[in-house]
Image (cartoon, coloured by chain):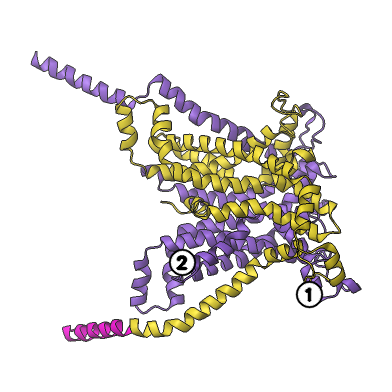
Chain colours: A purple, B yellow
Amino acid sequence: MAGDIATSARVDGARRRKRAVRLSTGDRIAMTVMVGVPVLLTGALIWFPTISSIGLSFTNWDGIGGLHTIQWTGTTNYRQIATIYPPFWPAFRHNLFWLGALAFVGTPLGMFLAYQLDKQIRGSRFYQSIFYIPVVIAPAIIGLISELILSPQQGLISSLFADPRHGHVIDWLGDPSRSLWAVLVLACWRHASYVMIIYLAGLKALDPTLREAAAIDGASGTRTYFRVVLPALKPINIVLVVITVIEALRAFDIVYIINRGRNGLELLSVLITGNIIGEASRIGYGSAIAVVLLTISLVPIVIFVWNSFQEVPES
Amino acid sequence: MTSAAVDTEAVAVETRAASRPRRRKRRAKPSRVALHAFLILTVLVWASPILWAIFTAMRPYSDTSEHGYVSWPRAFNFTNFTNAYTQSGMLHYFWNSIIVAVPAIFVILLFSSALAFVVSRYSYWFNVPLLIFFMAANLLPQQVIITPVYEMYLRIHLPTWLSSSGLAYDSFVGLIAINVAFQTGFCTFVLSNYMKTLPKSLTEAARVDGASVTRQFFGVIMPLCKPAFAALAVLEFTWIYNDFFWAVVLMSSGDKRPITSSLTNLSGQYFTDNNLIAAASVLVALPTILVFALLQRQFISGLTLGSTKE
């Protein structure tokens, strides 16, 4: 008798514990909606198109005929963009230059300035507010501003170092061999600001005892930075690597507003867009270039995801 | 090492430690001055493109064409601003930006907080894959997906009360949807990190009291996320307002384009008048700069919440 009660109590307890964790039907519906709706939207508008881009890159679809006119052509598009599509390699090279400029100028400059701002200085807030402004300005507007600076007739550079009113001009935007470099200065300007915000936050969050310990050990400022600060900020450094690569691949607005990405400003992103809203309408080429872009972007994405979610399960 | 050696070493360290602060204090001054000089110079260089745009915008075209752009201004006024504002019908485009940005931000925050709630309150097998699904979507270059999105939008029919074009293409709904799909990942990531810092006992207590999941979400967790919402709203406003690419490709009617993408018309229209372009650029940049100036703390915390794990 007593044993029976004990058993039933135990069963009851077990069941109640189980029930406490288990969700009611209403709760289950609510959670399905909470997860399901965003998943459907992002799935339909991001991941389905990603897979479609890969699929379309193996076809010769013109985008006009219905889906039944899609013809499988294997790797023809890839072979053709690499051989008989003149703007591909210049665009590819320009993206590499863009990446190089951000990685070797923009990012280090942002890190350096953040490091300077991290020293306990008066007026740090003031400096920061000025330094951060380029981040909030649309890249398209930065494109317009670069025209104000670089335009041969009315630009700052030309007016300063030549005499446009008497026919002497400096035309950097018109010269395909120089236009990219001129634009990259402004791209780096914006990127350095972006890096500065993220890096300064990282520096401020760093345990000050690390640096104090290094100072007591007699390490110089530079040595402390490279041996202590830089390694301790590994998570931030990874974020910086990721945004640098992604921003270099995404670059579009600045060059598009200047001259629709021509005359030395060709980029992969511009070629893809040109194949849908431009004169050339080759969905297959555009998609093949998109896959090239996707393949490169997967490197930073995987790095980022790998580093973000390693410790997630137990937290 | 003998104890004597240890002792002398300790003494040496002590004296070094004692003498250092004094020495550093005296030496610090010139280096501080140099640092400030460096920063002031850099800040000037940093602000110069913007200052140049403002300077050009404030001068009448006649003045600059006569005396050149680098010259002492004979006249200084706001005529270019008023011209740029009225001639291009800027108010209309500002309004288009609001029509896109406000609903988009609302839906993004709703979606991402719902996802973050589930991920941070329950431990399902799909939590990590789910976060990756959204995070990676946010990191893709937009051009990877634009061709299929464009073709899809041309084929998705919407009722005319929702879209005057009858399609997802060239509609506000379409533009809002792509912004939401793209940006939800970032906010989900930030909010799930944020919600993980809220004690689990909060929702557990609510559940014991019989609160449903929706009650726990709307009644307990969402009010506590206000600071994160504010930060993300400021950030998302800036990004969506500054968006150029989606609207240029997916919005064909010039008069439905948000302000930033409507700038494409500008560089052709005022090709000969840099002063007007300068004025328009400054005007269009002004809202985000103002938002940033007023809500700098939110802006920065939103950005850094995503990069530094709490």
Q: Nearer the viewer, mark 2 or mark 1?
A: 1
What amino acid does circle 1 point to? Leu
- Residue A66, image quadrant: top right
Q: Secondary structure at mark 1?
A: helix
Nearest the eye: B212 or B144: B212
Q: Amino acid at mark 2?
A: Leu
Please rate how many residues cluster around mark 1, counting C-alpha atoms within 10 Å: few if below 14, some from 14 to 19, many from 20: some
The residue lying at 46 percent from left, 57 percent from top is: A235
Could one spot residue A243 in this view of the protein? yes
Q: Is residue B274 left or right of residue B51?
A: right
Residue B17 part of the magenta-drawn span:
yes
Question: Can you say whether B60 is above or below A82 in the image?
Answer: below
Q: Would residue A314 be found to the left or right of residue B175 on screen?
A: left
For residue A230, which numbered disc appears in the image?
Answer: 2
The residue stretch that appears in magenta: B1-20
Quadrant of the snapshot with the N terminus of chain A: top left
The relative height of residue A150 versus residue B187 in the rendered view (above or below) is: below
Q: Position of residue B49 (x, y in %)?
A: 69, 65
Marks 2 & 1, CB-CB < 8 Å contact: no
Nearest the camera: B164 or A38?
B164
Residue assigned mark 1: A160
Q: Pinpoint residue B35: horizontal percent, then vertical percent.
A: 51, 77
